[in-house]
Image (spheres, rainbow, N blue to C red):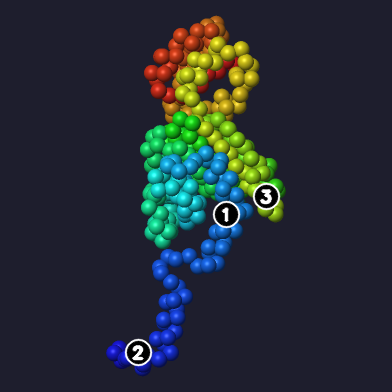
Amino acid sequence: MLNRTRRELGPLFVLGLLTLLAVGRPGAQSAAARQQETNREAWQKVPEIVAAMGIGPGAVVADVGAGDGFLTARLARAVGPLGRVFAVDISDRALERLRARVQQDALTNVTVTKGDANEPHLSAASLDAAVIINSYHEMVDHEAMLQQLRIALKPGGRLVIVEPISGKRLKDARAEQVDVHEIAARFVEQEAREAGFHIQTLHDPFVSRADVTEWLIVAVPNADATTQAAASPTSNDETAWTSPDLRIAFDTFKKRRVEKSIVVVDVRSEEEFIAGHIPGALWIELSDLNSHVEQLRAMRKPIVTYCS
């Protein structure tokens, strides 16, 4: 019968009450889960990650690939009530966990945002910093994601990326590393440069645990490409011309050229240009490049020059 009294239910009622008390309010973290996060905060050096982001009270930041909100909750404390944290993920399941965490911890300064594989959906020049922790290797369209994050950062803003790599896989190809959820710093350094960042800091290793280490990169958006192009010809510093931050990988160059997302400029002599050049390339001799800055700026695309 359904209308039995509490006395008649006896042990069944008591068992149900004890179960409710053990579970607590929906979404609440158990003591074991809290301890696990405290341990992770220590070994993953979360205070150092926050310091690398260069943020404090009132900052606006993004946790990209936020997952269960472990780092989001700590960033919310770091930026305080006047700051804002955008917790971004593309997984519906992760977004559910994020929203539960925001409600559970009363994180009133956190906005949960659904991203896409190539777009975090963050406003241009809105962020003081962004962080990707143990998620970059999962990003299939990492080129577009990096470019969108560069656009979302304020001038001088920082992108911090933390990823694991094991010693036995350090020399493997990128695809082989990603298959086991790892990636070496050298790949991400190059990809960040190609997306318009320069590498401010590299800590490798940043964390060491058994046979796996985690590295940390701080990347900062480059100044406007045409401004750099205007300044470079007047420089006699050979180091500036050969800086890796100014290079683009050949495969990326081919892809961007097909997409017509770059402007290709041949800076050789007129005779060399006439003898043979990349189809569609503009000819602007190196010595005359400075006088064409406004023309190049009006194209509103990254400029790629070549001389051989």
The residue under the point 57% across, 15% down is 307
Q: Nearer the viewer, mark 1 or mark 3?
A: 1
Label 2 sits on residue: 6
Sooner in the amino-acid sequence: mark 3 or mark 2: 2
* Label 1, label 3: how far apart the Cα atoms are: 14 Å
Secondary structure category for the residue under label 1: helix
Percent coordinates x, y for residue 148 in the rendering: 43, 36
Q: Residues within 10 Å of mark 2 (few under 14, many from 20)?
A: few
Q: Mark number for residue 41?
A: 1
Secondary structure category for the residue under label 3: strand
Reply above or below: 256 against 12. Answer: above
The residue under the point 51% across, 36% down is 158
Residue furthest out toward the left: 3
Residue 148 shows in the view: no
Reply above or below: 149 against 224. Answer: below
Identify the image quadrant of the N terminus.
bottom left
Q: Please, what is the three-letter code of the amino acid marked with disc 2? A: Arg
Q: Please, what is the three-letter code of the amino acid marked with disc 1? A: Glu
Q: Please, what is the three-letter code of the amino acid marked with disc 3? A: Ser
Reply above or below: 302 against 290. Answer: below
